[in-house]
Amino acid sequence: MVQIPNPPAPPLPAPTRSVPTSADVARLAGVSRATVSYVLNNARAVRISEPTRRRVREAARELGYVPHAAARSLRAGHSRMVLMPAPAFPVGPLYSRFINELQAALCLLDYTVVQYGTVGAHDDEAARAWAELRPVAVLVPGSGLGPQGVEVLKRSGARAVVTLGPETVEGAHALLMDHDVVGYSAGAHLFDTGRRRIGVVVPGEPGLDTFSAPRLAGVRAAVRGTDATVVELPLAHEEEAAAGLAARWRELGLDGVFTYNDEYAMLLMRALQDAGIRIPEETAVVGADDLMLGRLLRPRLSTVQLELPSGQELADLVDRAVRDPGAAPEAHKVLGASVIRRESS
């Protein structure tokens, strides 16, 4: 008879380390739990010396302690999460810098900033997905959110809904980014430098029509009632497309072009130069955003410099709305523009 040996008993799991608490931090730092809370939540209303603040932070770091967001929300009666849906359109360095400033300012006001991808959802449908996370505030870039979506968010507990786009939405605070002024500035500059047949690049990338349409309208407004004409130039962000447009440039008879932004300017300038078009002698080129690379081109790129609000200004608006959710929605025009003239025009 064959006896089957018993397998060895599995090793006992290693004991798990207990999760550090604010009481542990208080003991290590030699302060009260209230002081720990004030320091780690960046409360500036309570006067705490910098050495004490440093001691608390060092104790928290040594223990691996982080505040519990859910517990903090229970104490406050609402979450401290600010949801920022990811834009459904390509964004450049200027917008990214603005968002980074905003996140830093909100963190100093004790909010937790969460970016949310919107793949597969759009418009008011996306608002339902955002509402599931129960944010205290939602900052919505671009257009698409409607009054119904705002209502869904507010019913889920959002105290502030702020849109960043070309128009207001009923029930939401609004930062109005009027892109007409960008096109108007470029068109007026080209006209003032003697250009009379002006092309305007309209990007083919999805989602950019929210910005490109008002920029085109702005150029048209700048030369309305003059002898100048404006020609719309649809263009994909591809070398082949730019080369194709440059190949028929002399047929179009354009002596100036506003390229929507600096990235399209770089794409088109290279193609025009390859086709033997002299810049600015035959065609003046103006971009927008004032990217560093534009200053490194030859000729150096003229551009429209955009003036966005500081991240702190928007963070303060969010904080006011959270503190007073019944206040009437605010609307602020926040986009300014001015031309920086360089060699390309």
Image (cartoon, rainbow, N blue to C red):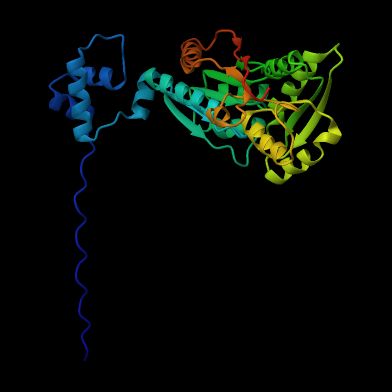
Q: Position of residue 56 (x, y in %)?
A: 20, 23
Inspect this view and state whether residue 206 appears.
no
As rendered, which of 163 and 214 lies closer to the eye? 214
State which quarter of the image contains the C terminus.
top right
As rendered, which of 51 and 91 lies closer to the eye? 91
335, above or below 134, in the image: above
Q: Residue at x 54, y 25 (%)?
A: 94
Q: Residue at x 19, y 53 (%)?
A: 14
As rendered, which of 272 and 124 lies closer to the eye? 272
Q: Position of residue 334 (x, y in %)?
A: 59, 13
As rendered, which of 232 and 299 lies closer to the eye? 299
Horizontal arrangement in the rendering, residue 258 relative to residue 230 (left or right): left
State which quarter of the image contains the N terminus.
bottom left
Inspect this view and state whether residue 248 appears.
yes
- Dividing the picture into quadrants, the one containing residue 77 is top left
Q: Position of residue 58 (x, y in %)?
A: 19, 27
Q: Residue at x 69, y 36 (%)?
A: 268
Horizontal arrangement in the rendering, residue 39 relative to residue 299 (left or right): left
97, above or below 2, in the image: above
Q: Position of residue 193 (x, y in %)?
A: 73, 16
